Image: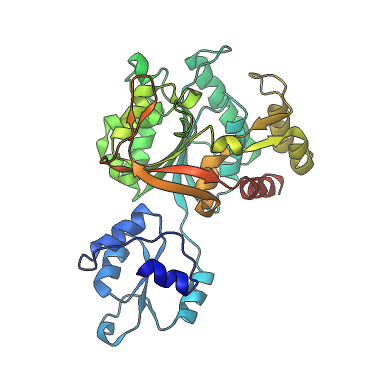
Amino acid sequence: MTVNWLESEKIEYDKLILTNSKNPLEKAKNCLENDISIMIDDSVRTLMEAHNRGIITLLMDTQYNRIEKNLKRVHNWKEIYEFIKGFHREKLNVILDTDTYNECDDQFALSYMLKSQDIFNVEAITVAPYINKHCTIPEGQENSYNEILKICKWLEFETDNKVFKGAMDFMINGYSEDNDAVNKIIEIALKNEKTYIMAIGAITNVALAIKKEPKIIDKTHVVWLGGHSFLQGHNIETNFKDRIAVKTVFDSKVKLTVIPAKSVSSNLTTSIYELEHFLKGKSELCDYLCQKFYNDGYHGIQERRVIWDISVIAYLIEKRWFESKEISCPNIKEDSSYEITENRHKITMVNYLDVDKIYTDLFRKLGG
């Protein structure tokens, strides 16, 4: 009935969520789960539950709710429009978990995040483990750490107590040690009402933090670039290398959004010519990013590449650039493939992104 009415009145909406009207807590919980900043309602009980959880509330004036004096009251949709037009959402508390020196896409993602500090309160940058033909995991940690410091210096981001080395091996190899990144993730998650972990490498640090302190599960939202879409039938890719870590995060019931590599973020292809058109000569950082794109030192010289990792940053900047679906959390099989399920807890799987809008925003911010 609601869908038919919305369509007949030509009212645009992003998502329809039906709740139990007799439970005033349900709407507040849905606001938190769907990153809704403002709740408009005529029910005082519903809005108090939302207000107590840090959600901005607008009470639509009616005769039966005028005894309430503490909530922001509005009388018509013009007032609501004027309020929202002048509203500035609170910054998102974020941690970026990145294998920065593995490929050139991490440098773009880190720069994109730091250029979006009007949206992000950057709590920490943690170094995710990686291994390739050029270096061991400890060497990769050191290289990534130094790369983060270099980019942060260019963008005048203060790194004291902000950058932390992480796991020196993968959980699939039996690694379970404490490290600075894991401890910092836990510390930040426990102090905030909500923290977003933007994971753009192997998800080992996040899994170790969840395993060490399960209390962070209800206080974090993990957005992870990893695995492939279900169309591929396998998850053979770098960020899925630590299968035990992936399984730990998936099974934990943490709020989880997955952006697959192939079939989704793989669409973020660009060329050195496009990059140089928008970025070359704009700053020392921009020239460095163009250089790393052309020859990242790992894959050799390439005129065209995918900048995978910017997808995670863009997702938290503007979700309207993405299409996603809530699904029953798949099981992680021994061969790292997904086993489709029907009755497990929900996760969000992204299945489409708007390449043009993401690159337009990236080039505007980096070249600005």
User: In percent of the image, x 59 and y 27: which residue is there?
Assistant: 147
Given residues 303 and 222, the one toward you in this image is 303
Q: Is residue 283 visible?
A: no
Residue 56 horizontal/vertical position (percent): 39, 66
**Which of the 4 image quadrants contains residue 184?**
top left
Q: Is residue 170 left or right of residue 310?
A: left
Q: Is residue 167 left or right of residue 103?
A: left
Q: Is residue 19 above or below residue 104?
A: below
Which quarter of the rendered picture does the N terminus lie within? bottom left
Which residue is situated farthest in the left direction here? Answer: 22
User: In percent of the image, x 50 and y 72: which residue is there?
Assistant: 10
**Which of the 4 image quadrants contains residue 330?**
top left
User: In percent of the image, x 50 and y 36: which residue is there?
Assistant: 160
Residue 268 horizontal/vertical position (percent): 62, 38
Which residue is situated farthest in the bottom direction here? Answer: 63
Q: How is the image coloured?
A: rainbow
Q: Is residue 205 visible?
A: yes
User: In percent of the image, x 28 and y 42: which residue is there?
Assistant: 345
Residue 58 horizontal/vertical position (percent): 38, 73
Q: Is residue 189 above or below residue 127?
A: below
Residue 333 horizontal/vertical position (percent): 33, 24
Q: How many marks?
A: 0
